[in-house]
Image (cartoon, grey):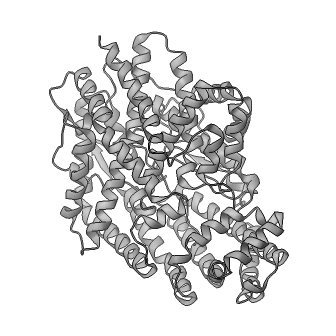
């Protein structure tokens, strides 16, 4: 089943002005010229014929293939993935540019249904691969070097072996996938159509969330209360989506015999459950040393007796509001990338010059930001909602990091280029860190350094502490749903059960904040995705420490890691740096970097 990129909302994004310069838009013609491009119909016709031919040639016969025959089979399957991925990327990206356009929504839905129908006969491929004897498959992988390249793919497919159903049931689930996608689209379209009014101004969700970082506290409060009011008015729809998605997942997991709701995500991420548990436990244990300490500092800076939820992302009082134009943002990120290695800046350049970024905030456009790799014989596209605040520069650095990673990994081909989520955040967070360090280096004085440090700490808390709290929320939600239908109040209670613990004693929570789970897309589109952010941040902090301690030769090892895409396990990718994510002390190294920044901020207080 092909899934679309989904918009990742950045709760730290902030409102800007219209004076941002010439913001780029996507040129999707590198995929297709338009809905009526003859090549699009040609590709759909080819897909229909090739899927049928593939099934006729190979169904029931995989176990009898020799190494050369299996290689040809894998390469044909890869080509099907490439063409189907191109069609779905084009349909999905056009939809996210204007989610309120019924024509684009229909085109996307029709494309999804056609490709699902074409590819249903291919479900046998992974099922039969998993029925090949282990020793026989290993012998073929050892015998044929080109086939051996796909070992990591086979390992990931065969990790699902204990949970695989009958061929007939797998085909049924494949066909049924479009129904689950319809619930995701209901969520997206509901979010995109929500209307908010703050101080007489009509806003969409992105503009309203952005007001939570406004300098005017009254405006922040008004935005928070309006968000609560609108979420509350729509909470039954969001609860229905969550109940349905969680129940569907529980049924499929139960039939597959998966031991936990998280198992599928861990398998997809090629990461062991105990590694994720070690990460989660390390972060939760560090809440008092990280978020609790930092928000107590921020409470004093803001001159408040108590923090309210609308103060969490408030600008610091010593921070002068600054709008960063697009050209300046581009220059900042490009210089930071080039300072690490000129090749990084060269890889990022076409995003700015060739229509690979869609940056402006527009009515109907999906909120948030993402980098979508499309297919390996094209190139990635980056979506932003650029509003000109320093955090938006960091979002640009983050998404460009993904884009650079995706370009480097493309050489692995369609089946090996895709990086598990836990490592997919590495280059993006590293790109942010490079940009932050460059900005810190250029700080004019202690005041500017303090503002930058505090901003980075907040971003890290949002990436690590907040995402692990989100993960705990999901774990509790899916566990509770196994006991029956959840009312909106049930889900609200689960949400609040993780908020106080993660944010700390400095906060009070307004009435209505209990519904703020409703707008977070990861819970709907990709359950348990969120821990990948914390994984990536911790990993990058450890990587950056290695870079600072021993910069000689680091760049080559870093580029090799990105070029590997999904061809290696995290253990093998990190070994050249002397790092091991399965070591319980590994996560404390990453968290200690955040702690040291808070130490410096406290020291500045004298």
The residue nearer to you, when weighing 55 against 564, is 564
Q: Quadrant of the C terminus?
A: top left
Q: Quadrant of residue 288?
A: top left
Q: Examine the rendered structure and indicate whether residue 322 appears above or below residue 140.
A: above
The residue that appears at 68% across and 50% down in the rendered structure is 27
Question: Furthest-front residue in view?
Answer: 135
Residue 18's spot in the image, x, y percent? 48, 33
Q: How many numbered marks does the figure carry?
A: 0
Q: Quadrant of the N terminus?
A: bottom right
Does residue 376 appear to the left or right of 538 in the view shown? right
The residue under the point 85% across, 75% down is 68
In the rendered view, tell whether residue 304 sits above or below residue 59: above
Q: Which residue sits at x=82%, y=79%?
A: 66
Can residue 182 be seen at all in this image of the molecule? yes
Return the x and y of residue 444 as percentages of the image width and height: 49, 10
Of residues 476 and 355, the one nearer the viewer is: 476
Image location of residue 282, percent across then percent down: 37, 43
Q: Position of residue 153 (x, y in %)?
A: 66, 65
For residue 326, say whether it is visible.
no
Task: Give the image quarter of residue 11.
Answer: top left
Please report the residue visible at 35 percent of the width from the left and 70 percent of the height from the top: 246
Q: Is residue 16 left or right of residue 421?
A: left
């Amino acid at each position: 089943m092909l899934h679309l990129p989904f918009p990742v909302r950045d709760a730290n994004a902030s409102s800007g002005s219209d004076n941002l310069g010439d913001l780029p838009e996507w040129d999707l013609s590198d995929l297709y010229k338009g809905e009526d491009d003859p090549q699009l119909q040609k590709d759909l016709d080819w897909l229909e014929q090739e899927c049928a031919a593939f099934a006729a040639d190979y169904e029931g016969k995989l176990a009898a293939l020799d190494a050369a025959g299996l290689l040809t089979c894998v390469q044909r399957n890869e080509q099907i993935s490439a063409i189907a991925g191109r069609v779905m990327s084009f349909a999905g990206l056009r939809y996210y540019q204007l989610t309120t356009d019924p024509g684009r929504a229909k085109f996307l839905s029709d494309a999804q249904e056609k490709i699902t129908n074409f590819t249903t006969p291919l479900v046998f491929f992974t099922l039969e691969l998993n029925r090949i004897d282990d020793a026989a498959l290993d012998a073929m992988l050892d015998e044929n070097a080109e086939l051996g390249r796909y070992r990591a793919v086979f390992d990931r497919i065969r990790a699902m072996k204990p949970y695989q159903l009958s061929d007939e049931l797998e085909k049924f689930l494949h066909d049924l996938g479009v129904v689950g996608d319809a619930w995701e689209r209901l969520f997206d379209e509901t979010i995109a159509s929500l209307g908010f009014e703050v101080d007489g101004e009509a806003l969409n969700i992105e503009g309203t969330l952005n007001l939570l970082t406004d300098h005017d506290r009254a405006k922040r409060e008004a935005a928070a209360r309006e968000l609560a009011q609108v979420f509350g008015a729509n909470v039954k729809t969001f609860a229905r989506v969550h109940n349905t998605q969680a129940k569907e997942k529980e049924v499929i997991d139960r039939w597959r015999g998966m031991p936990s709701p998280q198992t599928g995500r861990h398998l997809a991420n090629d990461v062991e459950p105990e590694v994720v548990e070690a990460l989660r436990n390390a972060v939760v244990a560090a809440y008092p040393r990280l978020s609790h300490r930092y928000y107590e500092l921020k409470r004093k800076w803001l001159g408040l007796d108590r923090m309210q939820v609308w103060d969490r992302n408030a600008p610091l009082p010593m921070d002068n509001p600054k709008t960063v134009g697009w050209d300046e943002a581009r220059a900042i990120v490009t210089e930071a990338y080039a300072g690490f290695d000129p090749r990084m800046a060269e890889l990022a350049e076409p995003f700015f010059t060739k229509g690979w970024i869609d940056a402006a905030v527009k009515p109907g456009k999906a909120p948030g930001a993402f980098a979508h790799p499309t297919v390996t014989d094209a190139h990635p596209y980056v979506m932003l909602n650029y509003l000109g605040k320093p955090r938006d520069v960091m979002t640009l650095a983050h998404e460009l990091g993904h884009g650079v990673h995706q370009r480097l990994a493309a050489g692995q081909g369609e089946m090996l280029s895709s990086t598990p989520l836990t490592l997919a955040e590495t280059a993006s967070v590293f790109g942010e860190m490079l940009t932050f360090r460059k900005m810190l280096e250029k700080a004019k004085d202690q005041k500017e350094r303090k503002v930058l440090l505090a901003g980075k700490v907040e971003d890290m808390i949002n990436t690590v502490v907040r995402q692990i709290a989100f993960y705990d929320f999901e774990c509790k939600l899916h566990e509770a749903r196994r006991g029956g239908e959840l009312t909106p109040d049930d889900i609200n209670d689960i949400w609040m059960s993780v908020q106080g613990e993660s944010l700390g004693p400095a906060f009070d929570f307004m009435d209505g904040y209990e519904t703020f789970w409703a707008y977070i897309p990861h819970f709907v589109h990709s359950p348990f995705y969120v821990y990948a952010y914390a994984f990536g941040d911790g990993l990058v902090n450890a990587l950056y420490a290695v870079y600072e301690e021993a910069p000689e030769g680091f760049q080559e090892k870093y580029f090799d890691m990105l070029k590997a895409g999904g061809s290696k396990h995290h253990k093998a990718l990190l070994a050249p740096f002397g790092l091991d994510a399965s070591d319980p002390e590994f996560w404390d190294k990453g968290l200690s970097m955040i702690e040291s920044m808070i130490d410096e901020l406290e020291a500045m207080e004298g």
